[in-house]
Each structure stands twice: as C-alpha cells, then as structure tokens.
Image (cartoon, grey):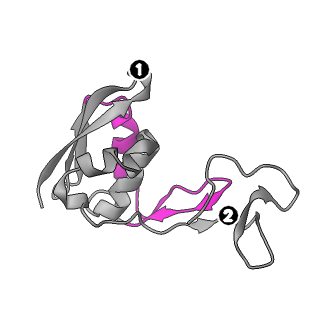
Amino acid sequence: MAVHTINLPDMLYGREMRTVIWDDVAGTVTGTHSDIPDMQRDLALPTPVDCSSEGRVLYLHNPAHDPADFLWLLGFAFSGILYEPLRSTLPPVFDGVDLSPMEPAPRARRDAEGNITDRYEDGSFLGYDMPYS
C-alpha cells in the first residue's frame, strides 16, 4: 500500500472535485477537500474512533491504515462516493472493500422479522443514517 489520491466532490464548493490524499502507511491525509481538517482530526484521535450517531453505532478501529475504516471518512465527506458511478473512481486499494460494519442504534425500531424500520421506538423518523443494510 502507499499514497492514494482520491477525487471527491466538495459540497462547500458546489460539488467541485477536490483532492483527498491518503497515505495508508504513514496514516495521514492531506489535500484540497474542505473535509480534510475533519479527517485529520479523526485520524489523530485515539482508537477506536467513535463515529456513532442517533441512528447507528460505529467504531473505527484503524481509520489511518484500514481502507474499510477510511472509506467511512470519505462517505462522511460525500456519501455518493460509496455508490456507483463514483465508487469505481476510487483507487485500487478500495476494490472489493466493504465499509467497516456498523450496528443500528439501540433505539432503532424493528419490524416483526427483526428488520430495521425508518422510525424510532417513539415513532419519530430515524433520518440520515437509515436504511441499514
């Protein structure tokens, strides 16, 4: 593995393509994308990095070096990168890599078959982090 240059739409700049340069050996990230400071902060945190929210339980155990964990950081910056056609533009280090697993938040409601619904137990809409797969 080595240094990977990723072109990622930047929402702060009208979806203009900006760069994310990830060195998976050194565990660093640089580039022109507006989310670089957030990514750098996440990589500097002690692991596991808690990326949980109201809708999910997610811990990144090695985001500085593991493509499955770093993929989450890219998705936080621009979720469309996780899906085609943009997914195929990622460097080969991400080929065949699935996101590190997350779990639904404990508050998430399930149907009779145990599948997550789009509502919390109190009936309020789950929002951004659903549906789960």
- Give the residue at x 43% y 27%: 11
Q: Report whether residue 42 is seen.
A: no
> In the rendered image, which residue does mark 1 sit on?
14
- Give the residue at x 32% y 44%: 86
Element class at badge 2? loop
- Give the residue at x 16% y 48%: 4
Rendered view: 60 above or below 111: above
Location of residue 40 (image quadrant): top left
Of 86 and 46, which appears nearest the observer? 86
- Left or right of residue 36, residue 117 in this image: right
Of 87 and 104, which appears nearest the observer? 87
Quarter of the figure that contains the C terminus: bottom right
Q: Position of residue 104 (x, y in %)?
A: 64, 66
> In the rendered image, which residue does mark 2 sit on?
105
Amino acid carrying label 1: it is Gly
- Left or right of residue 19, residue 87 in this image: right
- Give the residue at x 41% y 54%: 72
Q: Report whether residue 107 is seen.
A: yes
Element class at badge 1? loop
Q: Which residues are magenta?
A: 32-61
Quarter of the figure that contains the N terminus: bottom left
Q: Position of residue 110 (x, y in %)?
A: 76, 70
Q: Residue furthest top?
A: 13
Q: Position of residue 56 (x, y in %)?
A: 61, 60
Rendered view: 81 above or below 33: below
Answer few, some or many: residues within 10 Å of disc 2's Cα (few below 14, many 20 plus, some between 14 and 19): some
- Left or right of residue 75, residue 131 in this image: right
Location of residue 109 (image quadrant): bottom right
